[in-house]
Image: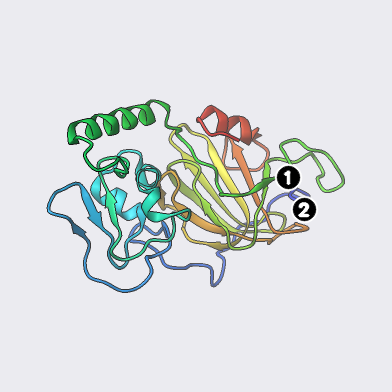
Amino acid sequence: MTSAVGRHRAPRPQSTPRRLISRVSAAGATLALPVVGAGTANALDGGSGTYTVASGDTLSTIAEERGIEGGWQQLYEDNKSVIGDDPDLLSIGQKLSLDGPTDTSPTGTSTSTTTATQASYSSDKKETAPTAVLPVSGGILTAGFEDSGDLWSNGHTGQDFAVPVGTTVRAATGGTVVSTGRDDAFGYEVVIRHDDGEYTHYAHLSQIDVSSGTTVGKGDRIARSGSTGNVTGPHLHFEVRTTPKYGSAIDPLDWLRDHGVKT
């Protein structure tokens, strides 16, 4: 697939997209898909360090409410054998471990040995845990930073990820949404300011799930990918800037690697 992200003219004033907002949390951000089915209230299993999934739960909300260090990504890694390959799809009644990886050791393994192994695994994860995530899962890298060609008047300003329309777009790291709207070239877009003073930009979206002023965490869902704006096919345009405005872009793959993300 050939991506066609580029900048052909100065941005025009942003406007609020219509019919874009889907289910929104109290903070204004849709963090993940709800669990399948209907059930009762959330339940910790007698303080045993496990949690039974209930109706309306998401990994993001469980991790936040239970204070999971490492957030929903750590909770998912610890329970991947239970949840499966899709972290957005939970089922009512699933029992999730809150204390580390789900125990898959043979019957008879001592509790102390298992606990020590889990503690060691958790410690290793903390030491090497990245401080950012890829903005989409399963994307194919296409047009890169500073690529040249007829599609871009001054070189490509970001990294394109070829993904189907509707793919979940996540905040690369935590921050505050500073703008959302539509631009002629970038289509529907979101810009987030991060604690280090840098900004990430997500463009060509089909749906926006946050609004200006929303606080988001690393990996929180902020939008769905699309093909709006100046494109030749569906993809996410991901850009890292030193200011919220166009023209201050830096290499987004270098930025991701500096934050411990494998690209």
Residue 141 placement (x, y as % from top left) = 69, 43
N-terminal-most mark, 2 or 1: 2
Dots 2, 1 in contact, CB < 8 A:
yes
**Left of 21 or right of it: where is 155?**
right
Could you tell me the amino acid type at mark 2? Met
Is disc 2 surrounded by few (<14), some (14 to 19) or many (20+) residues within 10 Å? few
**Which residue shows up at 32% across the image and 43% down it?**
104
On the image, the x and y values in percent for residue 76 come to: 39, 47
Residue type indicated by callout 1 = Thr
Of residues 197 and 263, the one drawn nearer to the viewer in this rendering: 263
SS at mark 1 in the image: loop
Is the residue 34 above or below the residue 177 in the image? below
Secondary element under disc 2, as helix, strand or loop, is loop
Residue under the image location 54 percent in, 27 percent down: 258
Image x and y of residue 220, in percent: 44, 50
Residue 90, placed above or below residue 176: below
Question: Residue 228 appears in which quarter of the rendering?
Answer: bottom right
- Check the picture and name the quadrant holding the C terminus: top right
Residue at left offset 57%, top offset 37% = 243
Q: Where residue 10 sits in the image (x, y, percent)?
A: 72, 49
Label for residue 142? Answer: 1
Q: Considering depth in this image, is 21 or 54 the residue closer to the camera?
A: 54
Check disc 1: other Cα within 10 Å, few if <14, some if 14-19, many if 20+: some
Label number found at residue 1: 2
* Residue sitting nearer the eye, 9 or 128: 128
Please, is residue 195 above or below residue 40 in the view? above
Q: Is residue 81 left or right of residue 20?
A: left
